[in-house]
Amino acid sequence: MINPPRIVHNIPEAFYAPVSDYINMPKMKSFESAGFYCSVLFHELVHCTGHQDRLNRKEIIEYNEFGSDAYSREELTAEMGASFLCNYAGIMDDRLLDNSAAYIKIWLDRLKSVKNY
């Protein structure tokens, strides 16, 4: 990735901060496996591709309230991207796949429940 965000391990939460353009990750030892760590990191890295200096995705550059349509679309984008990256990297774990599928289902169901979708 050209001009990647900083990746820090300051607090035990995973998130992408678009304004400051950095990813915070919990320390690897807090994950069940390196594969689970990579899956979460990939999720946050997909979020960062939406930064204004990268793909300029409106779901990242505009404020979106938790659970809103745009927020839901961005979560789907990030989790599907993370799943693709895990597959590409050869990270194959049934539990990881089940977790990812469940997460995708939550946000897909949220979008399906919206009248204008």
Image (cartoon, rainbow, N blue to C red):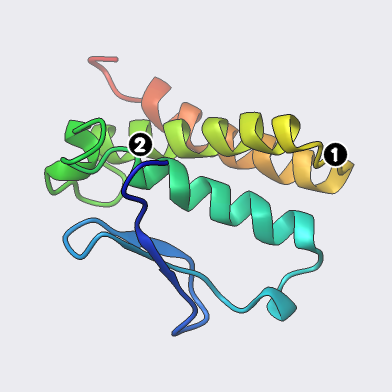
Q: Secondary structure at mark 2?
A: helix
Quarter placement of the C terminus: top left
Q: Which residue is mark 1?
A: 92
Amino acid type at image mark 1:
Met
Name which residue lies at 48% across and 66% down. 14
How many labels, in total? 2
In the image, residue 60 lies at what x, y percent?
Answer: 23, 43
Quarter placement of the N terminus: top left
Residue 47 as seen in the image, left or right of residue 60: right
Name which residue lies at 30% across and 24% down. 114
Q: Earlier in the sequence, mark 2 or mark 1?
A: 2
Q: Is residue 107 above or below residue 41?
A: above
Farthest residue to the front: give it.
2
Q: What crowding class fits label 1: few (fewer than 14 Cα within 10 Å), some (14-19), or many (20 or more)?
A: few
In the image, residue 56 lies at what x, y percent?
Answer: 19, 33
In the image, residue 43 lies at what x, y percent?
Answer: 52, 47
Q: Is residue 51 above or below residue 44?
A: above
Q: Secondary structure at mark 1?
A: loop
Which is more toward the observer, 9 or 62?
A: 9
Amino acid type at image mark 2:
Glu
Which is more toward the observer, 80 or 21?
A: 21
Name which residue lies at 49% across and 28% down. 109
Give residue 6's quadrant in the image: bottom left
Residue 21 as seen in the image, left or right of residue 92: left
Give residue 91's quadrant in the image: top right
Find the distance from the CA under tag 2 to the CA under tag 1: 24 Å
Q: What crowding class fits label 2: few (fewer than 14 Cα within 10 Å), some (14-19), or many (20 or more)?
A: many
Q: Which residue is mark 2?
A: 74
Name which residue lies at 74% across and 31% down. 87
